[in-house]
Amino acid sequence: MKLIGKLLAYPLLAVNIVAALLLIFSCYGSILAPIGKWPFASLSGLAFPFLYLLNFMFLILWLLTWKKGALVPLATILICLIPTLRYFPLHLSKSRNVNEPYITVISYNTEGFGIDDNKDWTLSNPVLNYILELNADMVFMQEVPRDIINKASRDNNIKSVYPYLGVSSASSNEAYFSKYPVVGLETINFEKTSNACLYLKILVGSDTLAVYNCHLQSNRLKETEISEYQKFIKNPTDSTHYKASKKVLKNLLESTAQRAGQARMISDRARKETAKYVIVCGDFNDTPLSYSHRLFNRFMRDAYAQSGVGMGITYHEHKLYYRIDHIFCSNNITPMHTRIDRTQKDSDHYPVISRIRLE
């Protein structure tokens, strides 16, 4: 206490208490649906990594200067332990060398098979070849050029590996490659948007696996808006950038409300699913501390949270680094090892790759 003095310690403690309350809200605010009086609650998880780091820095500061003060960040970190481990799992014992039998499942937003980095929509497309090299049992994709899937379906080499492949009828173009027979297919359209969900029934042995390949509502942020928002963060006194940031926030609030309704529709249907096994996967456009994620986490297993390590960033463009792509499994499916492959950078997303075991 003597090192910093009471005049400095108590104001810092007050700041720490505010930071602690904000961290708790970022972890648990998503309990509230993003409608009504608290529409921003579901977005509170976006601030989690920054608030956690701030509280951790306070913990170190108090341990070095005033140990009683450390009780505030320590208690906060303990209160937030479960959401923290969902956001940043530490399954260090989960080995990549998983004993068979297992099934490898991939969820991947391909961004039009790397439309921003190349215009090659032929079968030599690098994203397509990357997917084929992974040799997973099932690949569920979002934002896929319909032309490539049509060409792939006529290519004997691809068909010999993935005899079952196709694309949804929605303009968001959810697609799939499967080594297992697809015995049912349906496009679930969402209202007032081009985003959708591709529903599949897949025969695994004598059992049926139901898969919901989702692309929930996009945030619809333009590059110019994101640029202005980033400038506002650097210079919050600039009124021009402030107005732009308000527009970004308005878009985010509208999008998260739409995602909530879409996620609720899919989660209600997945709860009533008659197939023995169920997977809900895709681009959720929401972090692990969001209302949409919480809807599925209540009755399913988040494969990455159950068997991954670290933040598991899947979106990496515009200096925004979040895990917004997820694979959820019914409770009779065990995620053995899940990882994010950051080697393929043609898309603005990284794929989620999970080895699962049907119990």
Image: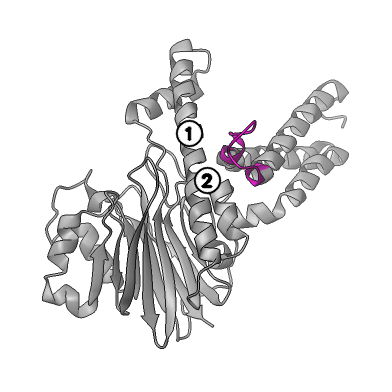
- Which quadrant of the figure contains the N terminus? top right
Q: Position of residue 233 (x, y in %)?
A: 50, 24
Q: Which quadrant is home to the C terminus?
A: bottom right
Residue 228, compared with residue 105, is above or below; it is above
Element type at mark 2: helix
Classify residue 121 by image quadrant.
bottom left
Please state if 309 lies on the left or on the right of 144 as rendered. right
Residue 8 lies, in percent from the top left, at: 81, 23
Q: Which residue is mark 1?
A: 254
Start and end of the magenta stretch? 29-43
Q: Is residue 68 left or right of residue 274?
A: right
Residue under the image location 77 percent in, 42 percent down: 73
Residue depicted at x 69% and y 56%: 82
**Does the stretch in magenta take in 159?**
no
Q: Main secondary structure of the magenta part?
A: loop
Residue linked to disc 2:
260
Vertical order, 341 against 246 (above or below): below
Q: Image height check: is 312 above or below 336? A: above
Residue at 51% across, 39% down = 257
Residue 128 spot, x, y in % from top left: 22, 62
Nearest to the observer: residue 291 or residue 53: 291
Above or below 25: residue 236: above
Local packing at callout 1 (Cα closer than 10 Å; few below 14, some 14-19, many 20+) is: some
